[in-house]
Image (cartoon, rainbow, N blue to C red):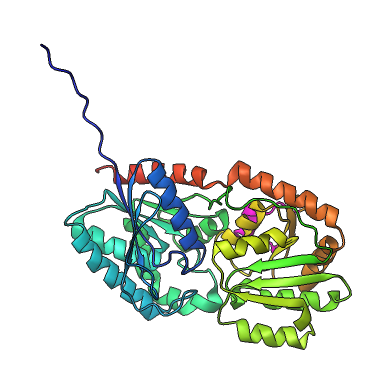
Amino acid sequence: MQGLKTTPTTPKKKILILNSEYPPIGGGAGTATANLARNLAAQGLDVKVVTARYDNLPALEQKMGFDLIRIATLRKRADRTNLGEQIHFILASFLYCLALFRRWKPDVIWAFFGFPSGIAAWMLKMVCGIPYIVSLRGGDVPGFRPYDFKTFHKIGSPFIKLVWRNARAVVANSRGLQHLARAFYDRVPIQVIPNGVDLEFFHPTRKNDKTTQLLFVGRVVYQKGLDLLANALKDLRNLDWQLTIVGDGSYKEHLHQLIEQNQLTQRVDFHGWCNKEKVLPLLSTADIFINPSRHEGMPNAVLEAMACGLPIIATRIAGNEDLVVDGKNGLLVRSEDVAGLQKALQSLIVDRNLCKKMGSYSRQLVEEKFSWQAAGEQYVHVLTKAAEKR
């Protein structure tokens, strides 16, 4: 009897994702990591995520098809980290991965941020020969938020170039960030894969409140331009609106003082740092989402608001411009233009029908262009190519 012929199965590609942020800590990059890891696992890849441990979060979790590994680090805050904590993450993740590779060796490493994760990925390549790609998110690109990162970028520029030069691929999450990266270092190709959004979790709901509900979600830091928003709203107290600010950060005390000074205390609610389960009800009751930021990579909070069918008022900067079609799903105003921001706010606060029309177009845009599935498929192509032997 002739034996049956068998076809050898192709082993799964093994992907290691490094990111010092993962929900509930960090910001948009952590959210992107969680969604893309899930998507890659759904496409049949063997995925592990190594991130920073914080508070009493478990060291190991089995997520939706992938392993989430939290390693001991010095991180003390959920919403932000300092240089010393980032350097510690580089060393801790490098040493942990050396031990991990004895039993599970990836085909490629995916570093979120050129620093700190990119440095760890470069070190692992030098020691173990494993290729890596880098996902640029904003703060790791010189020229981004110079008021916060100018000194770090000046000192770190040689290391950033080293990481980019040795990567198999460098990917920005918006066209604006791509242009900024090219202006800093034009000797490596930089492609764009935009962020996505969970279209099932974030979805439109009906709103019945007579008072126009304004919403901001993000870090309460100078970068986000909440001082501009507070000054723009100062002369709109005659209109019926209420502002909710979701987030925390170093600018919160100053913002409280400015709101009190502008006599807006009774019109502004602070919700502090919230996970997506707590943010969803606030998005569901909002009428207008506002992102008056000074710098962005590609803001996940804006994508989530768009998925919930909200019109967007945002500054005309990189990241926002990739998402907001001026006059279609929202209004764009020049950065630092308080009068322009005030005019945009007034036009939507008084016209609820226009809000609904723009909100419907927001949902249409994310369905067409910004799903995590589309982003995941593009990254699988990049990662597979990066894993090829050269």
Magenta span of residues: 314-326
Residue 325 position in % (x across, y down): 71, 51
Give the quarter of the image for residue 89: bottom left
Which part of the image, by quadrant, shows the C terminus?
top left
The one nearer the camera, 183 or 287, is 287
> In this view, which residue lies farthest toward the top?
1
> Is residue 363 a member of the stretch shown in magenta?
no
> In this view, which residue lies farthest toward the right?
238
Please say whether residue 133 is visible from this viewpoint: yes
Which part of the image, by quadrant, shows the N terminus?
top left
> Is residue 322 a member of the stretch shown in magenta?
yes
Residue 276 position in % (x across, y down): 56, 62
Q: Is 151 on the left or on the right of 383, as rendered?
A: right
> In this view, which residue lies farthest toward the left?
1
Q: Is 316 on the left or on the right of 35, as rendered?
A: right
Residue ID at (73%, 47%): 360
Residue ID at (21%, 54%): 129
